[in-house]
Amino acid sequence: MQLPVMPPIKPMLAKPAARIPPGMHYEAKWDGFRAIVFRDGDEVLIGSRNTKPLDRYFPDVVDAALRLLPPRCVLDGEIVIAIGDHLDFDRLQDRIHPADSRVRHLAATTPASFVAFDLLALDDTAYLGRPLTERRAALERALADTPAPIHLAPATTDPDVARVWFDTFEGAGLDGVVAKDPAGPYLPDQRAMVKVKHERTADCVVAGYREHKSGPVVGSLLLGLHDGDGRLQHVGVSSSFTMARRAELVGELAPYRLDDIAGHPWARWTEAEAHESGRLPGAVSRWTGGRQLDWIPLRPELVCEVAYDHTQGDRFRHTTRFRRWRPDKDPGDCTYAQLSEPARYDLADVLGTR
């Protein structure tokens, strides 16, 4: 492979903001795997956000790149999987599997798409130092009339349109809006963009925690909500704490620690057969080389308020942000009924593929 921009390269990143800024280039924020696709003739490499290769997990995207992308190019974008009219991040995670036969089966039954939103190189020309307006124009020319599963991300310079996207596209599983400097160059591994995401709050039961990788301090709180049958279901984690706060939490949680897990609503997590779905906090992580993620059970009596962007199925899609303890709340009142989700919106309308 001989391209003007060579792998590995880390993608340009975004910093959070509370509202959509004026005078920018706007795109929808996709909920998938960030990917930089390198194609040089018959060779295709797909680099992840941390530069680890994604090729083997997405043979369908490799095939699409060989069929549909320009013969020599480097594109920044997102790998997504749609089920019906909605993005489904769970199906993406299923692809990170050690068995090639399983990956290829999933590629055939739930194929992925690539949504391109930036151009890093085309033919013998590197575009990294060029302004976004020039990169976008070249990207639009390069992907003109390119069919699915390769898509050109919709973009606008109208903040009113961006606000409509922010309100409506979430219903198709998108994350929010990204704003970019129209005159800015492409800056790998720098937070040179702005992301505006949705935020909601919920009261959750804290029924356990994991220790931090650095030692015996709190790494993440394990959160639960009661379902319609009154069972406490694991719905996600909260882990954004300073090291000083992590140490303080050990003392705050100590009175609730259980030496014997019997009677805890998540006691079955100690059984091997309970880990098959990969959904449990004690399950083997596909991203950490088979490492077991142990947890410390707590009496399910503490309630905290967390901020979240949206849910995926029956849990929080991303790590939540701890807001405060809620001693005034009864754990039994922490139910799924308090969660809000946007009105559905058809993904085909986002991509303009109807």
Image (cartoon, rainbow, N blue to C red):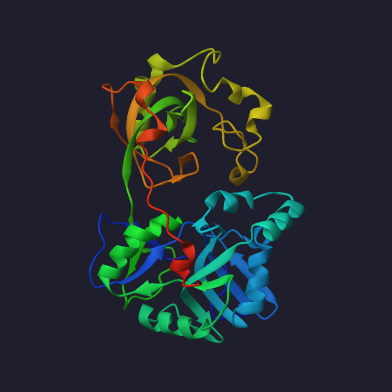
4 vs 208: above or below: below
Quarter residue 284 falls in: top right
- Residue at point 59%, 73% (across, down): 38
Q: Position of residue 324 (x, y in %)?
A: 28, 32
Q: Nearer the viewer, residue 303 or 330?
A: 330
Q: Nearer the viewer, residue 295 or 307?
A: 307
Quarter residue 14 falls in: bottom left
User: Which quadrant does the N terminus fall into?
Assistant: bottom right
Is residue 262 visible in the rendered image? The answer is yes
- Residue at point 67%, 81% (across, down): 41
Q: Position of residue 202 (x, y in %)?
A: 34, 36
Q: Is residue 347 left or right of residue 157?
A: right
241 vs 151: above or below: above
Q: Position of residue 277 (x, y in %)?
A: 63, 37
Q: Is residue 207 left or right of residue 323?
A: right
Q: Nearer the viewer, residue 23 or 215?
A: 23
Quarter residue 67 falls in: bottom right
Q: Is residue 204 left or right of residue 3?
A: left
Residue at the farthest right position: 101
Q: Nearer the viewer, residue 140 or 227?
A: 227
Residue at the farthest left position: 22
Q: Is residue 159 left or right of residue 337?
A: left
- Residue at point 44%, 29% (across, down): 224
Q: Position of residue 49 (x, y in %)?
A: 51, 59
- Residue at point 60%, 62% (across, down): 112
